[in-house]
Image (cartoon, helix red, strand yellow):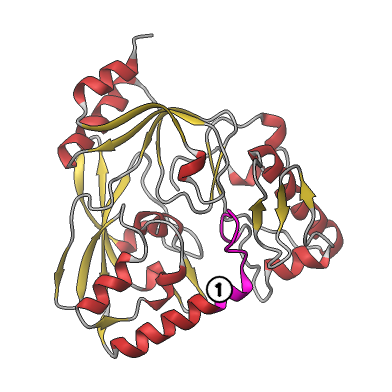
Amino acid sequence: MKDWRSEIERVVRGELVRDAPLAPRTAIRVGGPADLLVRPADPDALAALLQAVRRLGVPLAVLGGGANTLVADAGVRGVVLKLPQDFPGESSAGEALVLAAGAPTSRLPARAHELGLVGMEFVAGIPGTLGGCVAMNAGTRRGEMKDIVTRVELATADGAGFVPAAALGFAYRTCRLPPGAVVTRLEVRLRRGDVAESAARIAADREQRRRTQPLDRPTFGSTFRNPEGDFAGRLVEAVGLKGHRVGNATWSTVHANFVTNLGGATARDVLALVKLARALVKERLGIRLEAEVRLLGEFLAEDLVGLEDLGAPTGVS
């Protein structure tokens, strides 16, 4: 097989790092390296990358802010794409904002408040990037991305363009992106309102998270989706797993729907906790928990037993 990394380095402008550690780039700080990590310099460089991986038959994964993402201990084969925060820029018109997918979630409320806009308060406490929020239809009890996103710019090897939000099948913690598509920008529509009140709500939500979530240790965020009419954390606690440890990973004693890394945890440790919780909740309470976590990379088949419904490890996070 030809040296595909050298070929990609030849045709793509930007930051390209071989055998790049991915654990520091995920919220839970777990996982092995990427064969090649790429930050394209501009939209033309991204287009060159997408065309090259298709021509060379190289796998491509997209990494946002690393929230709700578990990277395999063996790492990720092929290219891992990480968009720069200001790529490919932003704009505004009236109550509509166009923002870069690689920007942190904090950019949306900050920019909205600059323009006197409100209605995006739920985004402020969600970790990761705006593109990752779109890919997960991230949200809280106050709202979801589908409530404010009007259209999304997608890039493929054949070009880039905006598609309406209605075409993406938004549902609870779900967005159906076309295979091989990379979210590069999103447009949201907000409303004029009291910025001071909006900022106060954001501050209150952050304080609530600080008191009720284990923000002092590396963690995904929520591990399981809340079943209808119930809470995943209550169910994990009900089967006695709050504080339960496997290796250097544990179900948090602060909030039982959070797996935390005590230092040096492996992806295998984390998956063992997830599988145990699902099995016990199903066996004792008759409820099937669905994971919010996205898998990225080369996992051992035996570690995925019991998690088949998550599908093959995904390239979008």
Position of residue 60 relative to residue 263, above or below, is: above
Residue sitting nearer the eye, 61 or 67: 67
Which residue is at a point 31% across and 26% down the rendered structure image? 53
- Label 1 sits on a secondary structure element that is helix
Residue annotated with mark 1? 209
Q: Position of residue 210 (x, y in %)?
A: 56, 72
Q: Position of residue 218 (x, y in %)?
A: 58, 53
Q: Is 152 part of what is drawn in magenta?
A: no
Kindly give the residue lying farthest to the left in the view shown. 93
- Is residue 206 shown left or right of residue 307? left
Kindly give the residue lying farthest to the top in the view shown. 1
The N terminus is located in which quarter?
Answer: top left
Q: Position of residue 192 (x, y in %)?
A: 23, 86
Residue sitting nearer the eye, 96 or 91: 91
Which residue is at a point 41% across and 44% down the rendered structure image? 63
Position of residue 205 relative to residue 103, above or below, is: below
Residue sitting nearer the eye, 16 or 164: 16
Indicate the quadrant where residue 42 lies.
Answer: top left
Q: Which residues are magenta?
A: 208-222
Disc tally is: 1
Q: Position of residue 39 (x, y in %)?
A: 29, 38
Identify which amino acid the numbered label 1 is placed on. Arg
Q: Magenta stretch: dominant SS?
A: loop
Indicate the quadrant where residue 271 lies.
Answer: top right
- Is residue 307 shown left or right of residue 184? right
- Is residue 55 shown left or right of residue 253? left
Residue sitting nearer the eye, 187 or 91: 91
